[in-house]
Image (tube, rainbow, N blue to C red):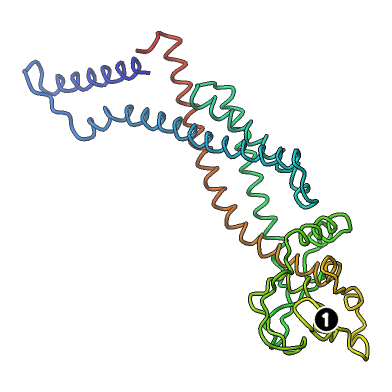
Amino acid sequence: MTEILEEYTALLARVLMKKQREEYGNKTVTIIPTTTQRLLLLQPFVIVSMFRISNTVVGALNVLSLLMGVAAVGGAAYILVRGGSECQKVVQYPLLMGGVFVVVVSALGIAGSLWRVNVALYAYLLVTFLLIVGLAFFTVFALFVTNRKVAQQISGKGYGEYRVADFSHWLQRYVVNNRNWDEVKSCLVDAHVCQNLALNGGRNNDSLIFKHLSTTQSGCCKPPVYCGFIMKNGTFWEVPKTGHVANNSDCGTWSNKQEKLCYDCNSCKGGVLANIRNQWRRLTIFNACVLALVTAIYALGCYAIRNNRSDSRCNSRKPCP
């Protein structure tokens, strides 16, 4: 690369000197390059510096992602060896596969950018391009499945109750089907979402005011308002002597047992879907930032490929100093 730059600079200098001789003849003159000519002389050095920086940045970012991938694999291995709850086992294999994928891709990026292995860098850029396409698709998809208005606000109560039918059909089919819901319910029990509810005032459901009640707690930790249950404490409710006010399956599903409560209620499923919708909307913003970062890394990787090609041409002609 250094030899190529020297040849380029010498050639440009000879062109400038020839132009000066054509203008002044054989007179001895002092050649003072113009600003444009100086920029032309500096241009290859600036480009090479940018190429070198691109290799370093791509390599450094992939070292960080490699460490994150190793941490993910270690976390999955810890759950596998030590055992865990049903909720932890749900994320065990996705965490393991995701960690292995990040480690392999990061290794390709490091080998291609820092060790000048072009085949590895081409493979890295291909995977990065597919990742860009996947992130863009997921961002649009997340906006599509969360664009419906949900949550019916109960007037004067300060919290919302949710219906499964208010959400997109995809979320309904994927989250609240019997197989997946058992896993979700296990995670809710493990997370103790209904423990230490912040309550203030009131002795029945009509005058109850919940402080900082999440959508999941609203649907899973208490019977629906329309059941007319009488509250004794945060998670203990009595059925009115006259029976259920409303003829609804959730009223019969409620249990004062801490491991059951309203986890099998449709209102709980609606609350979980509302929480997923809120989290996915935040995730779309995060995805947009990640998409911009990955696109920038892809562009730097393209510069690194160009730099590797230049080094290969230089080495094929004569070893560079």
Quadrant occupied by the C terminus: top left
Q: Residue at x 75, y 65 (%)?
A: 273
Place of residue 193 in the rendered image (x, y in percent of width and height, measured from the top left)? 72, 66
| Position in image of residue 262 (x %, y %) | 83, 71
Give the answer, above or below, for where 124 lies relative to 136: above
Measured as percent of width and height from the top left, residue 198 is found at 66, 76
Choose top left, top right, bottom left or bottom right for residue 49.
top left
Q: Position of residue 35 (x, y in %)?
A: 20, 35
- In this figure, what is the number of numbered marks? 1
Residue drawn where x is 93% and y is 83% of the image: 247
Outermost residue on the bottom side: it is 242
The residue carrying mark 1 is 237
Instruction: Give the quarter of the image for residue 42.
Output: top left
Where does the N terminus fall, quadrant-wise? top left
Q: Residue at x 57, y 35 (%)?
A: 66
Asked whether, in this view, residue 276 is left or right of residue 254, the answer is left
Residue type indicated by callout 1 = Trp
